[in-house]
Each structure stands twice: as C-alpha cells, then as structure tokens.
Amino acid sequence: NPYCEITVGSLTLKTPFMKRTNNPKWNTSIQFSLYDFAKDIIHINIFDNEFFSPNENIGYTSIYLIDILPCSLDIFLTQPSQPLTQTIYLNNGASAIMKCTIQFLLQYKQKSSVSFLHC
C-alpha cells in the first residue's frame, strides 16, 4: 500500500496510497510555491501504509532544483516539461526508479514560482 510524502521547505503533501502493489503509479499532481531555485529541494519519501501498525518508510530521494534547471530560466519556463527519472534508495539496500514531471509556472504577484510535481 505505498504512498509518497513530498516536502518542499516546511510544506509536506501526500499522494493517495495504492492498494496491494509493488509497482505504484500515482498519477497525482502536487503544487508547491518555490522561492529560491538555487536552494529549494524536493524531498520524496515513500511509505507503506499499514492499517494496524505504524507506516513503514521504504525509501527516499531528493531532487535539487538547481541540478535540473538549464542555464537559462526563461527558456526553461517556456518549454514543455520533460519527464525526470530519479533513483529511489530503498531501506533494504536496493533501489528503484521513479519517473515524474516537474512543471514550473511563474507567479508575478508573489514573484515566486509554482511547481507541479506529477508522479
């Protein structure tokens, strides 16, 4: 019954949990406000939802936005998002691959950006 907790700064959001699967496809969009592309990090923790015991953390990864941005932010904001492949490090020593799309939209009122993370 895996689900993701996705954290940017002090905000943490969760995906729905997927019943009885070891190969989840969440197809969920999550929105965050970003303020500093050089410092903002997307942390992703994967848990197994347990009904009668504490949820088990089964893996994690972090996406540093500075590592996925091209040299020109203006070009990046006008191009369609490309899927991002990220390695998830599992607590049993193995790893898995996660694919997601990150879309950036500029908000002029707050002078911040919004990221839609779709896993």
Image (cartoon, helix red, strand yellow):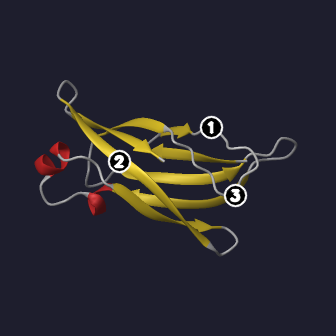
Amino acid at circle 3: Asn
Q: Is mark 2 on a helix, strand or loop?
A: strand
**Viewer-nearest of discs 3 and 2:** 3
| Relative side of 104 to 72, left or right | right
User: Which circle's residue, 3 or 1, is located before the other in the chain?
Assistant: 1
- Residues under numbered marks 2 and 1 in contact, where contact means CB atoms less than 8 Å apart: no
Which residue is painted at 39% across and 37% down in the image?
32
| Relative side of 35 to 108, left or right | right
Picture coordinates of residue 104, whole percent (x, y): 27, 42
Q: Give the answer, above or below, for where 93 lies relative to 84.
A: below
Count of picture labels? 3
Which residue is painted at 67% across and 51% down in the image?
47
- Residues under numbered marks 3 and 1 in contact, where contact means CB atoms less than 8 Å apart: no
What residue did someone put label 3 on?
22
Q: How far apart are the two marked residues, 2 and 1, measured between alpha carbons?
A: 19 Å
| Relative side of 67 to 111, left or right | right
What residue did someone put label 2 on?
102
Picture coordinates of residue 25, whole percent (x, y): 57, 48
Picture coordinates of residue 63, whole percent (x, y): 40, 58
**Viewer-nearest of discs 3 and 1:** 3
Q: Along the line of sight, which residue is nearer the eye, 98 or 67? A: 98
User: Which circle's residue, 3 or 2, is located before the other in the chain?
Assistant: 3
What residue did someone put label 1 on?
16
- Residues under numbered marks 3 and 2 in contact, where contact means CB atoms less than 8 Å apart: no
